[in-house]
Image: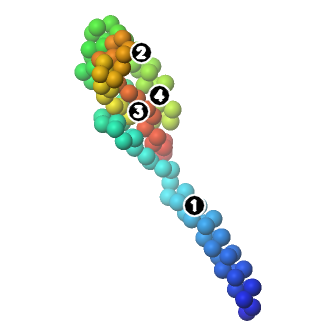
Amino acid sequence: MTRIKQTLIAAFVAALMFVAAPVGAQAAGKPAHGCPAGFDLGALTADQILALPRSQAAIKDGVVSEAGIRAGVAGVDKNGTGRVCVQLSNGLLTSNRPNGQYLINLVDDNSSVR
């Protein structure tokens, strides 16, 4: 076998391995990622978020309704898992918004629906 043929075969095998590796990873199923770093409460449902002390205080003080919280969670839940990642905000320490003491940060949990 000539040196050129050996080089071409080696390049073909390397290219095949490069292309086949992602296919093998995809065959393992859909990715299931969790919450980003800093989202200390993890992935919660709307009912669990409603039970948080900050949510309860905001409802009690008339800042938001239960329906408003549920709508907010649904708006963030882009993948339809029914869960979003929750992080307690530092409230008025980091926000000059009115009612900052009630704030929680929500992002989608990036989990795949199986």
Residue bearing the label numbered 1: 22
Kindly check if marks 3 and 4 are in contact, taking CB atoms under 8 A apart as contact: yes
Secondary structure beneath dot 1 equals: helix
Q: Residue at x 30, y 34 (%)?
A: 41
Residue bearing the label numbered 3: 84
Residue bearing the label numbered 4: 76
Secondary structure beneath dot 3 equals: strand
Density class for disc 2 (Cα within 10 Å; few <14, some 14-19, many ≥20) is: few
Of the numbered discs 4 and 2, the one sitting upstream in the chain is 2
Of the numbered discs 4 and 1, the one sitting upstream in the chain is 1
How far apart are the alpha carbons under marks 3 and 4? 7 Å
How far apart are the alpha carbons under marks 1 and 3? 28 Å
How far apart are the alpha carbons under marks 4 and 2? 13 Å
Q: Which residue is drawn at 36% across and 20% down?
A: 95
Q: Residue at x 45, y 19 (%)?
A: 71
What's the mark number on residue 68? 2
Q: Name the amino acid type tagged 4.
A: Val
Density class for disc 1 (Cα within 10 Å; few <14, some 14-19, many ≥20) is: few
Q: Name the amino acid type tagged 3.
A: Val
Secondary structure beneath dot 2 equals: helix
Kindly check if marks 4 and 1 are in contact, taking CB atoms under 8 A apart as contact: no
Q: Name the amino acid type tagged 2.
A: Gly
